Amino acid sequence: MTGARVLVVEDEASFAAALEVGLAREGFDIEIVHDGVAALDAFERGGHDLILLDLMLPRLSGVDVCREIRNQSSVPIIMVTARSEELDTVVGLEVGADDYVTKPYRLRELVARMRAVLRRAESEGLRSGVEAVTGAAEAHKG
Protein backbone atom coordinates (compact mmCIF):
# COMPACT_ATOMS: atom_id res chain seq x y z
CA MET A 1 0.00 0.00 0.00
CA THR A 2 2.89 2.36 0.61
CA GLY A 3 3.58 4.06 -2.67
CA ALA A 4 -0.06 3.81 -3.73
CA ARG A 5 -0.76 6.33 -6.48
CA VAL A 6 -3.51 8.75 -5.42
CA LEU A 7 -5.37 11.20 -7.65
CA VAL A 8 -6.43 14.20 -5.54
CA VAL A 9 -9.23 16.25 -7.12
CA GLU A 10 -9.44 19.48 -5.10
CA ASP A 11 -10.14 23.01 -6.32
CA GLU A 12 -9.00 24.77 -3.12
CA ALA A 13 -5.24 25.25 -3.37
CA SER A 14 -4.69 25.29 0.42
CA PHE A 15 -6.45 21.95 0.93
CA ALA A 16 -4.64 20.45 -2.07
CA ALA A 17 -1.24 21.60 -0.79
CA ALA A 18 -1.92 20.29 2.73
CA LEU A 19 -3.03 16.93 1.33
CA GLU A 20 0.00 16.70 -0.92
CA VAL A 21 2.43 17.30 1.95
CA GLY A 22 0.63 15.07 4.44
CA LEU A 23 0.01 12.16 2.09
CA ALA A 24 3.53 12.27 0.63
CA ARG A 25 4.86 12.06 4.19
CA GLU A 26 2.73 8.90 4.61
CA GLY A 27 4.35 7.36 1.52
CA PHE A 28 1.67 7.99 -1.09
CA ASP A 29 2.47 9.12 -4.64
CA ILE A 30 0.20 12.11 -5.31
CA GLU A 31 -1.19 13.69 -8.48
CA ILE A 32 -3.32 16.81 -7.99
CA VAL A 33 -5.89 18.29 -10.37
CA HIS A 34 -8.21 21.20 -9.66
CA ASP A 35 -11.42 20.65 -11.66
CA GLY A 36 -13.75 17.90 -12.81
CA VAL A 37 -12.68 17.84 -16.45
CA ALA A 38 -9.00 17.59 -15.48
CA ALA A 39 -9.98 14.77 -13.10
CA LEU A 40 -11.46 12.72 -15.93
CA ASP A 41 -8.43 13.43 -18.12
CA ALA A 42 -6.07 12.26 -15.35
CA PHE A 43 -8.23 9.19 -14.72
CA GLU A 44 -8.12 8.31 -18.44
CA ARG A 45 -4.31 8.39 -18.34
CA GLY A 46 -4.62 5.72 -15.66
CA GLY A 47 -2.40 4.25 -13.01
CA HIS A 48 -4.25 5.50 -9.92
CA ASP A 49 -4.88 3.18 -6.99
CA LEU A 50 -7.27 5.59 -5.24
CA ILE A 51 -9.09 8.85 -5.94
CA LEU A 52 -9.80 11.56 -3.36
CA LEU A 53 -12.61 13.61 -4.87
CA ASP A 54 -14.14 16.92 -3.80
CA LEU A 55 -17.84 17.40 -4.55
CA MET A 56 -17.85 21.09 -5.41
CA LEU A 57 -15.58 21.46 -8.43
CA PRO A 58 -15.40 23.85 -11.37
CA ARG A 59 -16.33 22.64 -14.87
CA LEU A 60 -17.83 19.29 -13.74
CA SER A 61 -19.18 18.37 -10.31
CA GLY A 62 -17.66 15.67 -8.13
CA VAL A 63 -20.92 13.71 -8.40
CA ASP A 64 -20.65 13.71 -12.20
CA VAL A 65 -16.96 12.80 -12.06
CA CYS A 66 -17.67 9.93 -9.67
CA ARG A 67 -20.53 8.65 -11.81
CA GLU A 68 -18.39 8.74 -14.98
CA ILE A 69 -15.43 6.99 -13.35
CA ARG A 70 -17.69 4.38 -11.77
CA ASN A 71 -19.16 3.57 -15.21
CA GLN A 72 -15.66 2.57 -16.33
CA SER A 73 -13.79 1.37 -13.26
CA SER A 74 -13.95 0.07 -9.72
CA VAL A 75 -10.97 2.18 -8.57
CA PRO A 76 -11.61 3.20 -4.94
CA ILE A 77 -13.05 6.71 -4.53
CA ILE A 78 -13.24 8.67 -1.29
CA MET A 79 -15.17 11.93 -1.40
CA VAL A 80 -13.47 14.62 0.68
CA THR A 81 -15.78 17.63 0.86
CA ALA A 82 -17.14 20.47 2.96
CA ARG A 83 -20.71 19.31 2.24
CA SER A 84 -21.81 17.59 5.42
CA GLU A 85 -25.57 17.21 5.04
CA GLU A 86 -26.92 13.67 5.21
CA LEU A 87 -28.33 13.96 1.68
CA ASP A 88 -24.89 14.91 0.30
CA THR A 89 -23.32 11.86 1.95
CA VAL A 90 -26.07 9.55 0.69
CA VAL A 91 -25.82 10.90 -2.88
CA GLY A 92 -22.02 10.58 -2.84
CA LEU A 93 -22.17 6.97 -1.71
CA GLU A 94 -25.02 6.08 -4.06
CA VAL A 95 -23.21 7.38 -7.16
CA GLY A 96 -20.26 5.17 -6.33
CA ALA A 97 -17.97 6.63 -3.67
CA ASP A 98 -16.50 4.02 -1.34
CA ASP A 99 -16.29 6.45 1.58
CA TYR A 100 -17.18 10.06 2.41
CA VAL A 101 -15.09 12.37 4.62
CA THR A 102 -16.10 15.92 5.53
CA LYS A 103 -13.81 18.94 5.85
CA PRO A 104 -12.19 19.86 8.06
CA TYR A 105 -10.78 16.35 8.30
CA ARG A 106 -8.09 14.85 10.48
CA LEU A 107 -5.21 13.63 8.31
CA ARG A 108 -4.58 10.50 10.39
CA GLU A 109 -8.23 9.46 10.05
CA LEU A 110 -8.23 10.15 6.30
CA VAL A 111 -5.05 8.09 5.86
CA ALA A 112 -6.58 5.23 7.89
CA ARG A 113 -9.69 5.32 5.69
CA MET A 114 -7.52 5.37 2.55
CA ARG A 115 -5.56 2.34 3.73
CA ALA A 116 -8.77 0.48 4.63
CA VAL A 117 -10.28 1.13 1.18
CA LEU A 118 -7.02 0.09 -0.52
CA ARG A 119 -6.89 -3.13 1.55
CA ARG A 120 -10.47 -3.94 0.60
CA ALA A 121 -9.79 -3.25 -3.08
CA GLU A 122 -6.65 -5.39 -3.02
CA SER A 123 -8.51 -8.22 -1.26
CA GLU A 124 -11.39 -8.09 -3.75
CA GLY A 125 -8.93 -8.04 -6.65
CA LEU A 126 -7.17 -11.12 -5.34
CA ARG A 127 -10.49 -12.83 -4.67
CA SER A 128 -11.82 -12.14 -8.17
CA GLY A 129 -8.52 -13.37 -9.63
CA VAL A 130 -8.85 -16.64 -7.70
CA GLU A 131 -12.46 -17.00 -8.87
CA ALA A 132 -11.40 -16.43 -12.49
CA VAL A 133 -8.69 -19.10 -12.25
CA THR A 134 -11.04 -21.53 -10.49
CA GLY A 135 -13.77 -20.87 -13.07
CA ALA A 136 -11.35 -21.42 -15.96
CA ALA A 137 -10.16 -24.69 -14.42
CA GLU A 138 -13.76 -25.88 -13.98
CA ALA A 139 -14.60 -24.97 -17.59
CA HIS A 140 -11.51 -26.82 -18.81
CA LYS A 141 -12.52 -29.97 -16.87
CA GLY A 142 -16.08 -29.89 -18.19
Image (tube, helix red, strand yellow):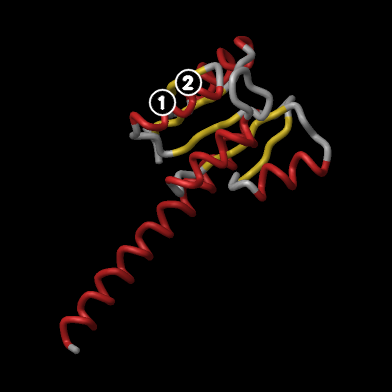
Callout 2 touching callout 1 (CB < 8 Å): yes
| 93 to the left or right of 17 | right
Q: For mark 1, what is the residue?
A: 42
Q: Name which residue lies at 55% across and 24% down.
A: 36
The mark tally for this picture is 2
Q: Quadrant of the N terminus?
A: top left
Residue 139 location in percent, x, y? 22, 81
Mark 1 nearby-residue class (10 Å; few <14, some 14–19, many ≥20): some
Q: Is residue 136 left or right of residue 73?
A: left
In three-dimensional space, the C-alpha distance between marks 2 and 1, rounded to whole angstroms, equals 6 Å
In front here: 81 or 55?
55
Residue occupying the point 59% across, 19% down: 59
SS assignment at label 2: helix
Residue 69 coordinates in the image, percent (x, y): 49, 40
Q: Amino acid at mark 2?
A: Ala
Query: Which labelled disc corresponds to residue 38?
Result: 2
Q: Callout 1: helix, strand or loop?
A: helix
Residue drawn at the location 63% of the way across and 28% of the way down = 61
Q: Which of the pair 61/33 is nearer the observer?
A: 61
Position in image of residue 11 (x %, y %): 61, 16
